[in-house]
Amino acid sequence: MATPQPAPAPKVKDDSEDIALVARAKAKDAAAFEQLVKKHHQQVYRLALTMTKNPRDAEEVTQETFLNIHRKLDSFRGESKFSSWLYRVTANFALMRLRKQRRQPQVLLDDLLPQYYENGQAARPASDWSERADRQLENKELGSKINEAIGQLPEKYRIILVLRDVENLANDEIAETLGMSVPAVKSILHRSRLFVREALNKYFEGHS
């Protein structure tokens, strides 16, 4: 049975509202900036939490992000989506915090991914978890395993997976956000999904 491919993520909605709010905020309209913060706070915090895996760090990254955005709002020219700029600033602050604290050991993704023989056959056959996953989407333990697997990914792999599969950014928007090429984003995303899928295989094998 062929492994189902993830459904294409929807395009990010038109950001005309953000453009209007940014214009008003640049004109010293404090209420407009507050609306921007309210609109994007949850997404920024969620991304920061996914990267830092610590609520206190995530909250501080969120605060630093919006303070930085407020100070540098005049430098935003609208050449990219406001949300892309916001995600890029968030990711940079989160990465700086992680590097400063040096909490996470460097992990080679090749050591985490499923291994294959030269003929392409899996060294350890992977069970088909897709149907059982569909039946257990509300299972808290499964959700915990997914989060645990994502948390083991190296920083760049984790953020790309979250931006694509959680925040629904398109590959070109992720590339713009992180200053990468689209092929590089696609490659990392594919390898990240492989690792998470393998983690779920192990989970279901333990519950078969």
Image: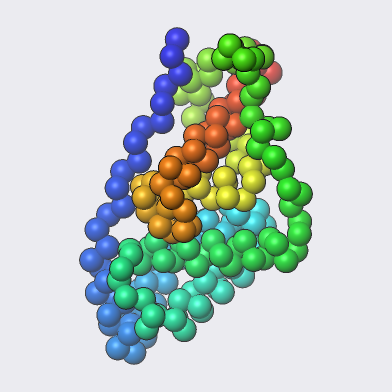
Q: Residue at x 76, y 49 (%)?
A: 105
**Left of 95 or right of it: where is 8?**
left
Pick the quarter of the image with the C terminus. top right
Which quadrant would residue 40 be assigned to in this image? bottom left
Judging depth in this view, the residue of 132 and 44 nearest the camera is 44
Q: Residue at x 63, y 42 (%)?
A: 153
Q: Position of residue 194 (x, y in %)?
A: 55, 29
Which quadrant would residue 79 be assigned to in this image? bottom left
Q: Position of residue 174 (x, y in %)?
A: 42, 52
**Left of 130 or right of it: where is 168?**
left
Position above or below: 39 against 107: below
**Left of 64 or right of it: where is 82?**
left
Judging depth in this view, the residue of 109 and 132 nearest the camera is 109
Q: Position of residue 155 (x, y in %)?
A: 62, 50
* Observer able to see residue 127: no
Position above or below: 185 against 32: above
How many numbered circles does the render carry? 0
Which quadrant would residue 113 be assigned to in this image? top right
Judging depth in this view, the residue of 122 and 48 nearest the camera is 122
Q: Residue at x 76, y 56 (%)?
A: 103
Outermost residue to the front? 118
Position above or below: 31 against 50: below
* Observer able to see residue 33: yes
Q: Residue at x 73, y 66 (%)?
A: 100
Q: Position of residue 53 (x, y in %)?
A: 65, 53
